[in-house]
Image (tube, rainbow, N blue to C red):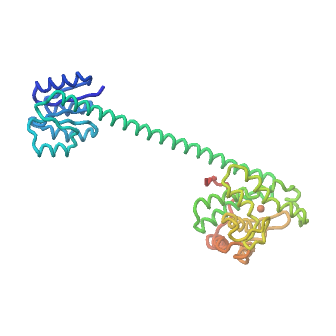
Amino acid sequence: MSKVLIVDDELSMRMTLSEFVRREGYECDVASNAFEALKLFQQNPYDVLITDIMMPRMTGIELMEKIRDIDADCKIIILTGEPTVETAIRAVQSQANDYLAKPVIKDEFVHVVRRNVQDKRFADERKRLIKENELYQRHLEEMVAQRTHALVKSMSSTITLISQIVEYRDPYTAGHQRRVGNCSAKIAEWMGLSQDVIDSVRIIGYIHDIGKIVVPSEILSKPGKLSKPEFMLLQSHSQAGYEMLSDVNLPPIIAEAIYQHHERYDGSGYPRKLKGDQISLQAHILMVADVVEAMTSHRPYRPSLGLDVALKEIEDHAGTLFDASVSKACLELFRIGNYAFDDQLYEIIMPL
Ligand SMILES: [Fe+2]
């Protein structure tokens, strides 16, 4: 039920007006001065305040200013026996909603009260709807955030699983993928690339040899030189990796960069002989890290060649086999940044 407060120092006025208000079906309280009104208002706000202006100690205008500080939405109707321009201006400044002159005419009074009660109801309803909408929006945002988090988590566990599968299959390269992933991320960081690129090259590195699970393990661990058919089978791993991952729900750059990780800047790589800009930035970074890591690691068919030889290989082929700026960053990372390979499995942050 709508609540109305009438403030007037004249008892008869309070009695008459409150009777009109109650007959309209509204709850009505009365106060004989502004202090009493303020006290009532502080205990329990009203929908409509009807106040006389000329009252001893605190005028209706002063009361209205105080009420506005407590409740900006209350509808205020002011009553006065002596309407002056100054009073009218102050009433407007204090955001009075209506203005009635004394003597009060019943029909006019009832009409004004009804209108203000109605306005207050609309305003309350509007406020309620806005609040409800905000809550709904917040709920929706929370839901999206939760689902996104779940999706990212499931993608991350897929990556970890894939990374482990390759290592079980090919223990000779145990740690190779993690070292390449971590080194690629460091090269990207050294180049000042975005966090998305840094995160994506780490992920691509962690699983880039997934296609090796289609290569017979005798070939993977063969100590001597591979025959041509064996070598071709080994080379098929980048395309096999791409095919395995292209239907998995992961960012497409992951499968694509894996497809490209044995291409070379000048088009001399495999399987598609892509060159320059046809190769993604992620794959350019990965191929450099892959070569340095592979050359510095022991293989069944040869011992480690050492870091100096590996870096010399990058230096000698910067701008031909390898992208020049990636090569430069890689050389600086090792020579100036004293980078050392690291085979930790860092938390996977999935760029969406
Ligand atoms: Fe590879």
The reply to whether residue 307 is in sight is no
Q: Residue 249: x, y in percent?
A: 68, 49
Quadrant position of residue 278: bottom right
Q: Nearer the viewer, residue 67 or 104?
A: 104
Can residue 32 be seen in this snapshot?
yes
Image-quarter location of ligand 1: bottom right
Nearest to the observer: residue 310 or residue 9: 9
Q: Is residue 295 above or below residue 170?
A: below
Report x, y in % for residue 9: 11, 30
Residue furthest front in the image: 107
- Front residue of 338/150: it is 150
Q: Which residue is situated farthest in the bottom direction here?
A: 316
Task: Tell me if 211 is positioned left or right of 318 in this view.
Answer: right
Q: Is residue 47 above or below residue 243?
A: above
What is the count of numbered marks?
A: 0
200 versus 144 height, above or below: below
Q: Residue at x 70, y 64 (%)?
A: 283
Query: What residue lies at 82% left-to-right and 67% top-to-bottom?
Result: 303
Figure quadrant of residue 233 = bottom right
Where's residue 279, x and y in %?
70, 66
Q: Residue at x 59, y 43 (%)?
A: 147
Rendered residue at 18%/24% (across/down) = 18
Q: Quadrant of residue 5?
A: top left
Question: Split into 4 quadrants, where in the image is the N terminus?
Answer: top left
**Up-down: is 246 above or below 110?**
below
Left or right of 324: which side holds 83? left
Residue 75 point in image, percent of width and height: 25, 36
Of residues 128 and 70, which is closer to you in this image?
A: 128
**In the rendered view, does 70 fall on the left or right side of 242?**
left
